[in-house]
Each structure stands twice: as C-alpha cells, then as structure tokens.
Amino acid sequence: MEAEYVALSEAIREVCWLRSLHNELGFKQKLPTLLWGDNEGAVAMTKDPQFHQWSKHIDIKYQAIHKWVAKGFVHIESCRDQDQTADILTKPLPRVKHKKHVLEMGLSPV
C-alpha cells in the first residue's frame, strides 16, 4: 500500500505542475483532474487525512496529497480491474491476455 500511495503522491505532483502550466498558458482548469489508482488502501488514504497505525511511517512529504484532493484540483478514483492494460508491463500473463494488451497498446499490427 505504501508504494502505491507514494506513486499516487508523485503523480499528483505532476498533475499539479501540469495544471499550473496550463493556467499560465491561458487554459483555465475548471474541473478536477481525474487520477486512477488500483490499490484500494492507497485510494482510501488519499480521501481520509486521518493517519492510521499502518500508515504513520510514510514520509510527511507524501502527505500533501490530501491538500490537493481537498482543494478539488485532483479527484482520485479506484480502478481495480482484473483486465488492466498496464498489467502487461508489471506481471507475466497468459498468451491470450498478453496479445490482447499488446493490441490495446497499439504495439502490434491488427
């Protein structure tokens, strides 16, 4: 859960920088940026700023995630799905799923 939370925190830092860049270029961001997380614990922790026994060891620099969610700049949703295309990059898959994900990523001619 900690690694996923840190990854979400880093992604939110990038999102905030990109939102700031867009605003400077004159493209006002009216809606929050949607960010998907695939770890239920990490997603729940971004929405609940209360520190729990199992999360108190996470570095304080990653806790700013709550501020951006509370201000409405970022909206985090859970995308727990057994059929995620990113699975091809993180785990071994059966041949059928592997081929499906390769096609979804556009890495193979149809």
Image (cartoon, helix red, strand yellow):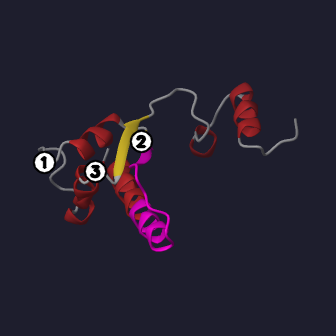
Between residue 26 and residue 10, name the one nearer to us. Answer: 26
Q: Which mark is residue 37?
A: 2
Residue type at the position of mark 1: Phe
Q: Position of residue 16 (x, y in %)?
A: 39, 63
Sequence-wise, the earlier of marks 3 and 2 is 2
Residue at the image position 24 percent from the left and 61 percent from the top: 64
At x 29%, y 50%, the residue is 72
Residue that protrudes farthest toward the right in the picture? 109
Residue beneath the point at 38% across and 49% down: 32
| Disc nearer the start of the sequence (2/1) | 2
The foreground one among 10 and 29 is 29
Label 2's element?
Answer: strand
Q: Measure how far apart labels 2 and 1 are at the Cα level.
A: 19 Å
Residue topped by disc 1 = 51
The magenta segment is 14-36
- Residue neighbourhood size for the residue with mark 3, other residues' Cα within 10 Å, grouped as few (<14), some (14–19), many (≥20): some
- Residue at left 50%, top 28%? 81
Q: Marks 1 and 3, Cα distance to the nearest angstrom?
A: 16 Å
Q: Are marks 2 and 1 in contact (CB under 8 Å)?
A: no
Percent coordinates x, y for residue 73 in the rendering: 34, 54
- Read off the residue under disc 3: 69
Q: Is residue 76 left or right of residue 88?
A: left
Is 9 in the magenta?
no
The secondary structure type at the circle numbered 1 is: loop
**Distance from the alpha carbon under mark 3 to that under mark 2:** 14 Å
In primary-sequence order, the first of circles 1 and 3 is: 1
